[in-house]
Image (spheres, rainbow, N blue to C red):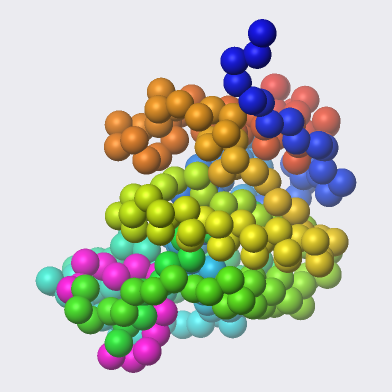
Amino acid sequence: MKFRTEINIDKSDRLIDHDQNILTIGSCFAKNIGEYFKSYRFSVVCNPFGVLYNPISIYNSLKLIHSKKKFKKNDLVEHQGEWHSFYHNSDFSHHDQNMCLEKINNGIISTHDFLKSTDHLIITFGTAFVYRYIKNDMIVSNCHKIPAKEFERYRLSLDETKKTIESIVSFVNSISENISIIFTVSPVRHWKDGAVENQLSKSTLLIAVDEIVKENKNCEYFPSYEIVMDDLRDYRFYDTDLLHPNKFATDYIWDKFSNAKLSNQCLTIMKEV
């Protein structure tokens, strides 16, 4: 008898090897899988702007890295004694303005050359909802606990989402013709959006990614969202907040990912590591 619907994933045509460079960017899955790559001694840069959630923020971060943007004091915003960048996660925030800028600029410099030599780019989208900072009409990556009245929150349409992802693919391909792009949608539920809105958001991302993958030979989709929602499908695989997958779940996802996306030589080296 079968007691669960296991998701089986075909071996990829564009396999990852230990001598290649990997960049992960986006939501929590990008962070988690980046940590697994690090533990197995891959050449990897993980979330150079911190955790990002929506497609527009991810696109902006890639452009800023490629242009080697140097952040200055007027690029930061101060709130409750700390300095923040609307392009970065709060991990980059600091009460000392110069320290905040140093951390931001060092991250961009160190990732600039790596992006140009990246063989595999793993992008994880968390939500189709965005926050627009009304004062300067900017889609932010993080609100940094600034009062909600200073932002407009809305969900990107399917067309807006697809066009943004198309821009990401086109931009990345202009940097490297041989780069492989793996898209995922985070299984973490954005419960504050509400059960229905969270599903609509994830559905928007899933449909947009599916259409992009069908149109671009160097793009693939990895079903991390479906593994948690349909394969594991049990709260024992969640953390105490009942929203984030726990270590059992992330280990299982990594096992599925590595068997589908890594070369056999790679898997052998990992056992030695």
**Side of 73 where 229 appears, left or right:** right
- Name which residue lies at 73% across and 31% down: 8
142, above or below 74, in the image:
above
Name the residue furthest left: 80
- Name which residue lies at 31% across and 62% down: 90
> What x and y, as percent, mark residue 199?
47, 53
Name the residue furthest front: 196
Q: Can residue 212 be seen in this view?
A: yes
Q: Main secondary structure of the magenta part?
A: loop
Query: Would you identify the image quadrant in which residue 105 lies?
Result: bottom left
201, above or below 227, in the image:
below
Q: 79 or 117: which is nearer to us?
A: 79
Q: Quadrant where the C terminus lies?
A: top right
Q: For residue 221: magenta?
A: no
Q: Can residue 31 be seen in this view?
A: no
- Name which residue lies at 51% across and 82% down: 69
Q: Quadrant where the N terminus lies?
A: top right
Name the residue furthest top: 1
Q: 32 or 272: which is nearer to us?
A: 32
Query: Would you identify the image quadrant in which residue 240 lies?
Result: top left
2, above or below 173, in the image:
above
Please provide the residue range marked out in magenta.
135-147
> What x and y, as percent, mark residue 7?
68, 31
> What x and y, as percent, mark residue 230?
57, 34
> What x and y, as percent, mark residue 196?
40, 54
**Side of 170 where 84 appears, left or right:** left
